[in-house]
Structures are given as structure tokens and as C-alpha cells.
Amino acid sequence: VATLCIGVAPAAAQGEVQIARVQYGGGGDWYSGDPLPTLIAYTRQHSLLDLAPEPITVELTSDRLFTVPILYLNGHGNVVFSDAEAGRLRRYLEGGGFLIVNDDYGLDQAVRRELAKVFPEQPLQPLPASHPVYRAHYAFPDGLPKIHEHDGEPAVGYGLFHEGRLVVFYAHESDLADGWEPAGIHPDPPEAREAALRMGVNLLVYAMTQGIVP
């Protein structure tokens, strides 16, 4: 299994950790919103992670994929991974990478189908509230917080694992990205935005402290 080589992407200063948004095919709006700069700024202020201030965008076919430790995938619609892309994503995750998937509502059916190409031997499984990701920096004793009310369903965090390590976190019926957007973009109350940002910090801290293979 190839180990992820954490390099320095051009947009990052020496020592800074770069986060990348996944540009995927299938017609879905992979580009929706601009939540990462706000989350990154909050994380830089409230944790010891040295993150590059601006994220980059990568395709799964790009060699830049293997220079970043954390990927973010978001959208409302269809997602399609080619067999080659699914294979590369699996190699990335097995080598130490971490993928955060945010369902912006409308993504669920497609992302489950495509993640099944990446790890066909295991389905997404709900993470118990006792999982370390919910206490990596801030305590979430009830698990994934509900940020945006869409259809009344509870928020659930799902995971995929490699050799016992959480490598994919899928936020369903929560829409963390709504709370990561700058204030005023969405009508979420301040306490919901704060919960979203804190959960985002947990994900990044967990990825960097537990998700990287030495």
C-alpha cells in the first residue's frame, strides 16, 4: 500500500497543511458555496493546526491529490467516479488521506453509490457518539450536530474504515458547510454556526492526528 506523501502545494507556505476540494464528474455542483476559508480561519485561531489559509481544488486524476492530507467533497446533485478515479481515491485513503463528505441535500444517493466503488467490501456505517472524532478537540456527546433543517431527519455521521482507521467521514442531514459559510449567507443561528465550525475543527484535528500514516 502506498503511503501518502505529504508535500507542499504551491499555495501553501512551508509547513502549512493544505486542504483540497474535490472536483468530481457527473454534473453535480462540486463548486457550491465557499465554506472552507472560514473553517480554515476558525481552525487556525482555535487549534494548533498550521493550515494554509486558502484551499485548492483537485481532480482525483491529478497527481496533486497525493500532496494534500485532507479532501472535502460537497454538493447537491450527482457524483460519478470512473473506475480509475475510485481506484486512486482508495489508494489515497489507504495511504493516509482523509475525506470529508458534506451532503448539501440531494447528494446522498449518488455519493453512497460512488463510495461503494471505492470500498465495495464495506458499506457506510453510522458512527456512535462515542467515536473519537466527536471529541478530537471539542466535545459533541450527542454526535454530529444538526446545522440546517431541511426535512426533519436527524443528523448522522457515517464512516468508512481502512485497517480500523476512519478514512471517510460523511455528514448526512446536517449540512455542516452551511455553518462554515460566512455569517449572513444562510439564516442559521449563531449557535448553529459555532457548532458547525467546532465540528469542522474536530474533523481536521482528527484527520491530522489520527489519520496520517507515519
Image: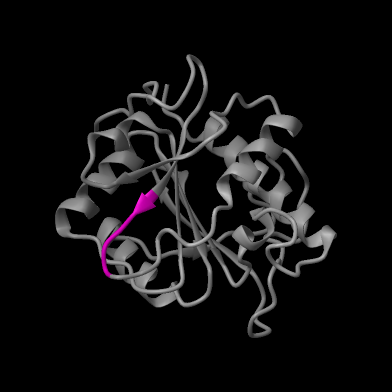
* Of the pair 61 and 120, the residue shown nearer to us: 61
Main secondary structure along the magenta-highlighted residues: loop
Look at 50% across and 27% down and name the residue there.
17
Q: Please indicate whether residue 111 sits to the left or right of residue 158 in the image.
A: left
Say which quarter of the image contains residue 193: bottom right
Q: How many labels does the image show?
A: 0
The answer, for residue 49, to whether it is visible in the render is: yes
**Above/below status of 164 relative to 48:** below
Q: Please indicate whether residue 36 sits to the left or right of residue 63 in the image.
A: right
Q: Where is residue 19 in the image (x, y as percent from the top left)?
A: 47, 37
Look at 71% across and 66% down and name the residue there.
147
Q: Does the magenta stretch include residue 44?
A: no
Q: Please indicate whether residue 52 sits to the left or right of residue 31 in the image.
A: right
Q: Give the range drawn in magenta.
A: 22-26
Say which quarter of the image contains residue 31: bottom left
Position of the C terminus, as image quadrant, is: top left
Look at 66% across and 42% down and name the residue there.
201
Position of the N terminus, as image quadrant, is: top left
